[in-house]
Amino acid sequence: MRYLCLIYGTEEQTSHLSPQEMNMYIDEHIDYDAQLHARGKLVVSEALQPAGAATTLRMRRNKLSVTDGPFAETSEQLGGFYLVEAESDEEALELAAGIPSARFSSVEVRRVKGGGARTP
């Protein structure tokens, strides 16, 4: 089964890190990606640009509305994600707990519906 691990946090949660510590933190993510990949558990992981760089669109009654910025004004913002393969909910939680961001941020774990991307 596939699970999406959504990483939510604030810029303040890592603002105390020095540039060297931030580089080490990023390297931890790269190392964890490699570990998951070696175990056949990682589908994909990505960090996202800051929420301020987002664009939100809505289609209502065939009219498109486009707004700069994130969908919601919240203190925590979506900062990245991991899509993993796990045999159970428990294993998915174990994999999510290993994500270095879990130390500073929140990681929401959700099972993906269906069998993944469909090809024509």
Image (cartoon, rainbow, N blue to C red):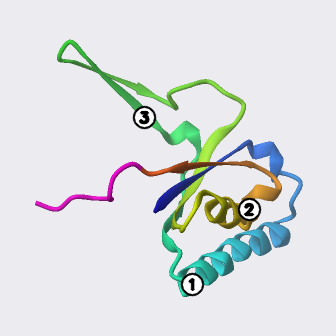
Above or below residue 16? Residue 91 is: below
The residue at the point 60 percent across, 83 percent down is 34
Question: Residue 73 bears which disc, if any?
Answer: none
Label 3 residue SS = strand
Mark 3 vs mark 1, CA separation in Å: 35 Å
Density class for disc 2 (Cα within 10 Å; few <14, some 14-19, many ≥20) is some
Mark 1 is on which residue type? Arg
Left or right: residue 72 compared with residue 119? right
Q: In this rendering, which labeled residue sits more in front, label 3 or label 1?
A: 1
3 or 2: tag closer to the N-terminus: 3
Q: Which amino acid type is marked by label 2?
A: Ala
Given residues 118 and 50, the one toward you in this image is 118
x%, y% of residue 117? 28, 59
Disc 3 marks which amino acid? Thr
Q: How far across and how far down the image is residue 33, in percent?
A: 60, 76
Q: Position of residue 36 (x, y in %)?
A: 59, 78
Q: Is residue 85 left or right of residue 27?
A: left
Q: Which residues are magenta?
A: 113-120
Marks 3/1 in contact by CB < 8 Å: the verdict is: no
Provide the residue designation for mark 2.
97
User: Which image quarter is the C terminus in?
Assistant: bottom left
Q: Residue 92, position in %: x, y?
A: 61, 61
Vertical placement of residue 81 versus 71, above or below: below
| Badge 2 element | helix
Determine whether label 3 and label 2 are within 8 Å by CB. no
Mark closest to the chain's N terminus, 3 or 1:
1
Q: Are marks 1 and 2 in contact (CB under 8 Å)?
A: no
Q: CA distance from mark 3 to mark 2?
A: 30 Å
Numbered badge on residue 55? 3
Secondary structure beneath dot 1 equals loop
Numbered circle sitting on residue 39: 1
Q: CA distance from mark 1 to mark 2?
A: 16 Å
